[in-house]
Amino acid sequence: MPFLKCLKTLAIIPALFLVATAPPADPQKRETLESLLALDVATAKIGYRIVTANAALCDQRIPASGMLLHGIEQYGGEYREAAARVFGLGEAPGVAAVLPGSPAAEAGVRAGDAVLAINGEAPATIASRQGKGDFDRMALVLDQFEGALAAGPVTLDVVRDGERRTLNFAGLPACASRFQVQPSTELNAAADGRYVQISSAFIGYFANDDEFAAIMAHEIAHNILRHRDRLDAQNIPRGFFSKFGKNAARIRETEIEADRFSLKLLANAGFRMEAAPDFWRRFGPEHGYGIFSDATHLRWKKRVAMLEAEITALRQSGAGSGA
Ligand SMILES: [Zn+2]
């Protein structure tokens, strides 16, 4: 990372300079922040590939830029100061990462850029709640940024190494979903209509990118098919009372739909459809009686059989033949 590299290559700089420079973040916090960012980037890469390759299948679209933004407010407690040092984050939202080959990358946006203005307007702010990290302000900034992209090419004013730059780019058509990694030891993924959330432990469980994509595609499918809206319209409760009777049956219906649709999303994005049944065949025997085992989801063997039958049907109809 830049800071460590600086210390190494600038070892002959007079001590006075080093004193004037902020001390490095404690190595453990740095490692935690950097590994969380790596998970964010991995998730964004797979999500970006799925939502851009399937734009034609979505009626709700948001242009994708391939740029990950973050703000100091989302880092809570003892991590706030470390995030400021590790990522160079100040008051302005920062570019956490830029996906290779994306519109933002081609426009010259770089990780570490601080965003001063979007189409000439300062990024949204919000009264900060001291200490506790939350995503409220960044959700507003993302609304602002995506709203600007939806209207056409965007002008971004950034500061890099103390120098102001103006960068212009247009987004790529994409299905509307935002991606978030939840630091958690639980193996879980969820979709709420807008966000797709996946736990850090779940990402660690995937054998390869195709399995990772299979789970992401399932959650993105829930958003594309507006399952949250449908269940809300039917007054289906979440949580404990969703696990029984008619409620469970309605939720299970959306789960099967999401599984079937996810295979098309995978094939269109060039991922292996077989990664979906492969994943459940591996996960099922180990965790089949955990969170995915109540009546809202198919038992894993049935799920594998259903996915395999669907893949056969899709292949016969010519879909996914290149994957
Ligand atoms: Zn689901």
Image (cartoon, grey):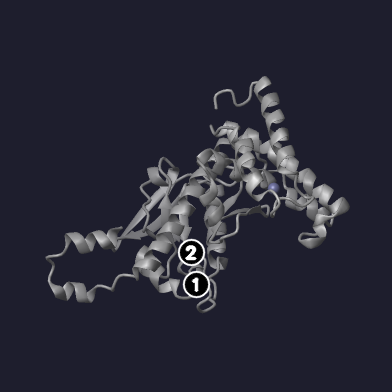
Residue under label 2, please give it: 123
Q: Amino acid at mark 1?
A: Gly
Counting every numbered tag in the picture gives 2
Residue at figure coordinates x 43%, y 66% from the top left: 92
Quote the CA–CA distance across marks 1 and 2.
Answer: 20 Å
Residue at figure coordinates x 60%, y 59% from the top left: 186
Q: Nearer the viewer, residue 314 or 226?
A: 314
**Assess mark 2: CB under 8 A from ligand 1?**
no
Q: Is residue 104 visible?
A: yes
Q: Amino acid at mark 2?
A: Pro
Q: Quadrant of the C terminus?
A: top right
Seen in the image, is 197 located left or right of residue 303? Answer: left
Q: Residue furthest bottom?
A: 130
On screen, residue 257 above or below 6 = above
Query: Looking at the rendered structure, which numbered label has been put on residue 111?
Result: none
Q: Nearer the viewer, residue 263 or 291?
A: 291
Q: Residue furthest front?
A: 285
**Assess mark 1: CB under 8 A from ligand 1?**
no
Q: Residue furthest right?
A: 246
Q: Position of residue 94 (x, y in %)?
A: 42, 61
Q: Position of residue 302 (x, y in %)?
A: 74, 38
On screen, residue 269 above or below 146 = above
Dot 1: within a 10 Å radius of its alpha carbon, few (fewer than 14), some, or many (20 or more) residues?
Answer: some
Residue at figure coordinates x 41%, y 40% from the top left: 101
In terms of sequence position, does the residue under pointer 1 or pointer 2 come before the other? 1
Q: Is residue 119 visible?
A: no
Which SS class for mark 2? loop
Query: Looking at the rendered structure, which numbered label has been put on residue 76?
Result: 1
Q: Position of residue 17 (x, y in %)?
A: 18, 72
Q: Nearer the viewer, residue 258 or 93?
A: 258
